[in-house]
Amino acid sequence: MVIAIGLPGAGKSTWFRKHSIEPISSDGLRVLLADDVDEQGYQEDIFRAARFLLELRLRMGRPVTCIDATNLLASHRRGFIEIGQRHDCRIEALFFDVPLEICLQRNVGRNRRVPEDVMRVMAQAMARPTVEEGFHRITVVGSIGEVAGEAAGS
């Protein structure tokens, strides 16, 4: 199981597309369930659906399942990690360590723009993933999509 972590505009969805990976995506679920990628009123339902799909894929024995969402806080990641632990699977973080200023520049060119003040609050709140959360490996991805480092846990 791979959990992407990073600000809007950090390159998470682009990275998955570039690697031909179809993740469980919070944006995709907003479109599927609420008919609008910008709909923020059903966050609890969107992430309940994401956790359900993760659980289902793990029960089906799929070899790898990726989660594409900002996942900025350990509390946002905890539900996914707990599901992975129940299924005794390897849990990896894909941390997009991209400076806020680059994310803000990219945000200007996106169809779905996040207000700058919201992006700044998100950047302040973001917690880097740690092996103590339950990750077996943390891969750091830089601003051009390159692997910039790795940390291994137990």
Image: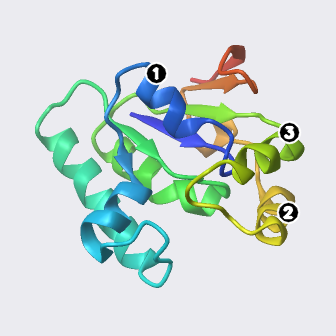
The part of the image, by quadrant, that contains residue 71 is bottom right
- Residue 149: tell me if it is visible: yes
- The mark lying in front, picked from 1 and 3, is 1
Residue at the image position 40 percent from the left and 66 percent from the top: 47
The part of the image, by quadrant, that contains residue 120 is bottom right
- Relative image position of residue 145 (x, y in whole percent): 65, 21
Marked residue nearer the N-terminal end (1 or 3): 1
Q: What residue type is labelled 2?
A: Arg
Residue that mark 2 sits on: 120
- At label 2, counting other C-alpha atoms closer than 10 Å, the crowd grade (few under 14, some 14-19, many 20 or more) is some
Marked residue nearer the N-terminal end (2 or 3): 3
Marked residue nearer the N-terminal end (1 or 2): 1
- Residue 134: tell me if it is visible: no
Residue at the image position 14 percent from the left and 42 percent from the top: 59
**Depicted 109 relative to depicted 78: above or below:** above
Residue 99 is marked as 3
- At label 3, counting other C-alpha atoms closer than 10 Å, the crowd grade (few under 14, some 14-19, many 20 or more) is few
In the displayed structure image, the side of residue 129 where residue 26 appears, left or right: left
Foreground pick, 77 / 116: 116
The part of the image, by quadrant, that contains residue 111 is bottom right
Residue 18 is marked as 1
- 3D distance between C-alphas at marks 1 and 2: 27 Å
Q: Which type of secondary structure does the marked residue at label 3 adopt?
A: loop
Foreground pick, 132 / 146: 146
- At label 1, counting other C-alpha atoms closer than 10 Å, the crowd grade (few under 14, some 14-19, many 20 or more) is few
Is the N terminus in the top left, top right, bottom left or bottom right quadrant? top left
- 3D distance between C-alphas at marks 2 and 3: 11 Å
Q: Which type of secondary structure does the marked residue at label 2 adopt?
A: helix
Q: What residue type is labelled 1?
A: Lys
- 3D distance between C-alphas at marks 1 and 3: 21 Å
In the displayed structure image, the side of residue 66 where residue 141 appears, left or right: right
